[in-house]
Every structure is written in C-alpha cells, then in structure tokens.
C-alpha cells in the first residue's frame, strides 16, 4: 500500500528540490563570474553564505525527508538525501575551488534526488 503524503511535506520536498537547484546555479555561477570577471568573490564565495545554505538544507531535509521516512518507511530517499548533505558538509571543509564545487554539485544533486524520491515514495 502506498502511504499518502501531506501537502505540507510535498511543498517542503518541492522547496528542497528548488533550493538544491538554486545552490547548483549559485555554485556554477560563482565559479564563472569570479573566474571570468574577477568580481564578487568576497560575497559569492563567502564561507558564511555556504554555512547558511547548508543549515537551510539540513532543516528542510530533516523535516521533509524525515517525515517521509517515518510515513512511508522506505529508506532510499532518506539515505540518498543524507549522503548529499554529507557531501555538502564535506565541501565546507575544503578550500574554494574545483574540489569544493564538485562536492557541492554531487551533494545538492543527491539531496534533490532524495526529495524527488520522497515525493514519489519509491525505492
């Protein structure tokens, strides 16, 4: 039997997907703008910006993915999102550059997939 999901949880999952997409755009745009134009590095690459983004991702994922895991009892969305959050956290420990960008892109992609799986309640 398929568990029914709450409209609030569905909105949180959609918000999580949107935030992951925005994070991905920010990451790529930051590299392009800072590398090509040499402007905005102090804001676009600021560690505080990334810490706040991770904190928001943690809260949205904890509520939406956690709620979904408790409701539909399927571990794949939860595990996928948590792996993504781990990659995002690992990116914070790296110096700015290609390594950080790769970890961030992998992380936000996995978090978005976790939210999508949570919406679909699929393994």
Image (cartoon, grey):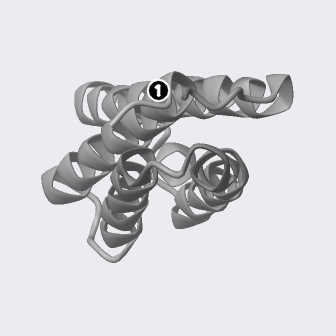
Residue extending furthest bottom?
A: 93
Q: Which residue is painted at 57% across and 48% down in the image?
A: 43
Q: Position of residue 104 (x, y in %)?
A: 32, 49
Q: Position of residue 73 (x, y in %)?
A: 53, 52
Secondary structure category for the residue under label 1:
helix
Q: Is residue 106 left or right of residue 42?
A: left
- Quarter holding the N terminus is top right
Q: Quadrant of residue 90?
A: bottom left
Give the camera-side residue of 92 and 97: 92
Taking 109 as reference, is 76 above or below it? Answer: below
Q: Which residue is painted at 72% across and 28% down in the image?
A: 5
Residue extending furthest front?
A: 1
Q: Which residue is painted at 38% across and 26% down in the image?
A: 29
Residue bearing mark 1: 116
Taking 100 as reference, is 92 above or below it? Answer: below
Q: Quadrant of residue 91?
A: bottom left
Query: Is residue 30 something that shows in the picture?
Result: no
Q: Which residue is painted at 61% across and 59% down in the image?
A: 58
Taking 50 as reference, is 15 above or below it? Answer: above
Q: Position of residue 16 (x, y in %)?
A: 60, 34
Q: Position of residue 61 (x, y in %)?
A: 61, 50
């Amino acid at each position: 039997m398929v568990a029914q999901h709450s409209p609030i949880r569905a909105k949180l999952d959609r918000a999580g997907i949107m935030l992951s997409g925005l994070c991905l755009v920010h990451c790529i745009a930051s590299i392009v703008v800072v590398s090509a134009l040499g402007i905005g590095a102090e804001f676009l690459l600021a560690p505080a910006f990334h810490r706040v983004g991770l904190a928001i991702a943690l809260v949205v994922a904890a509520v939406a993915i956690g709620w979904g895991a408790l409701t539909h009892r399927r571990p794949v969305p939860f595990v996928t999102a948590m792996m993504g959050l781990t990659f995002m956290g690992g990116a914070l420990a790296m110096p700015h550059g290609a390594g950080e960008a790769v970890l961030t892109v992998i992380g936000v992609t996995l978090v978005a997939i976790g939210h999508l799986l949570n919406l679909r309640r699929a393994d």
